[in-house]
Amino acid sequence: MSPDAFVGLEGVTHLCTGGESPWMKSHDAVYTDFARLKSLGYEGRGEVADRTEACRKKVARLWKVPADRVAFMPSASEGMNWLARGLDWSAGDNVVTTGIEFPSVAYAWRSLEARGVAVRRVPHCRWRVREEDLLAAIDDRTRVLAVSQVSFYTGQCLDLRRLAGGASRRGVLLAVDATHASGVVEVPANLTDLCVSSSYKWMLATHGVAPCYLSPRAENRTAATCFGWRNLVAWPRERMEALPEVPVRPMPEGMEPGNPSLVSVMFLSNALDVLLSTGMDRIQDHARQLSARIAAGLEKLGHTVITPGEASARSGNTCFLSGEAGRIHDRLRNRRILVWGELGRVRISGHLYNGSRDVDRILKALAGD
Ligand SMILES: Cc1ncc(COP(=O)(O)O)c(C=O)c1O
């Protein structure tokens, strides 16, 4: 995909999709369409609702899950917290996760510690989280194994097949934050119990909507903790003022107490057309090849790359340690090369609009030329 299809990329080397993707020019027509429908009142709302259901089907195709198991949450953080809040915890239960999670995953579970739930944070081994260590931390009081499919910090892509096999044998739910995976590597959401992703990074859409898959067994074990007109079975009009007890609707509306951000869903739908028509296998191969080239170049320059070496554990993110991450970011930005540099590492992200020229440019700039 040409960088010309995006706003503001002329003369810019955009390698920071792990933070924020550039804006597709074709989204402008989506906004115009939304504005037209919004002004049409009831009829327009109906049309937007149809578009929302069409988008649900596209997420389902991308993740290979049934569309009626995909809800639209406001953010990835909300999705993970839905499970953390909704399970029926007992003191002594535990959750297994990694020691290097983004706060959306780490804090969703940490908040349970006050209720006597232990959070087992499995440490990395030279920046690599080992699947066998995560599975070894599971015992008969483990309720959830919660991970990011792709690490925001190192770019490591975990083997979800292996984790899902080990977790389900022990009756443990697998909860996955796919924010750094969805749109750039295959997301086997059908193997998970909860899978949620932000839309504003690799999925090429924007903030306000995060598709979320919930498995039937996770739904059975989870009580809704947030209620509204959309996730409750309609209450009888003649008893409207009495607020009678009404059940929560099943998926997908069960996870949507109110309207999702409908304009964001329409942007997501447009972005999914691009991802699905390009093909996730092609995008994944391309991103992993870029990552291998970037990592090789960084190592030649003497940087400590913390992204795993083999293709299957790579993603769009390639990261190296640096005590000067912020300064490197600033120096590159002054040369119109965009990366993410914070927390002691620099993250270089390559997506379907990046190519060899971008890799050459950043490596040259890092070499000080
Ligand atoms: C792994 C991960 N999850 C979630 C988020 C944030 O997602 P949201 O804003 O949708 O909660 C980020 C943002 O960088 C992230 O890196």
Image (cartoon, grey):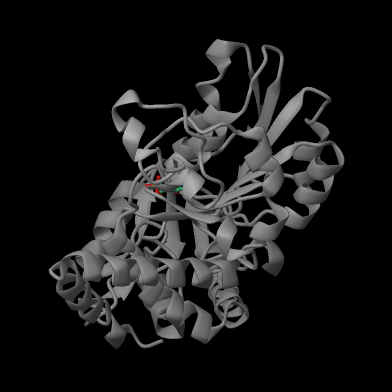
Compared across the picture, whether 48 is left or right of 279 comes to left
Residue 252 location in percent, x, y?
Answer: 52, 53
Residue 106 location in percent, x, y?
Answer: 52, 33
Report the residue at 64% width, 20% height from top.
89
Residue 6 location in percent, x, y?
Answer: 27, 79
Pick the quarter of the image with the N terminus. Answer: bottom left
Residue closest to the eye, 250 or 70 = 250
Pick the quarter of the image with the C terminus. Answer: bottom left
Q: Residue furthest front?
A: 238
Compared across the picture, whether 205 is left or right of 10 comes to right
Number of numbered discs overlaid on the protein picture: 0
Q: Residue furthest left?
A: 39
Above or below residue 40? Residue 206 is above
Quarter of the figure with residue 62: bottom right
Report the residue at 55% width, 61% height from top.
181
Above or below residue 166? Residue 109 is above
Residue closest to the eye, 196 or 326 = 196
Compared across the picture, whether 77 is left or right of 172 comes to left
Report the residue at 51% width, 33% height from top.
224
Q: Is residue 70 visible?
A: yes
Residue 7 location in percent, x, y?
Answer: 22, 77
Residue closest to the eye, 334 or 145 = 145
Quarter of the figure with residue 37: bottom left
Q: Residue furthest right?
A: 169
Q: Is residue 350 visible?
A: no
Report the residue at 44% width, 62% height from top.
348
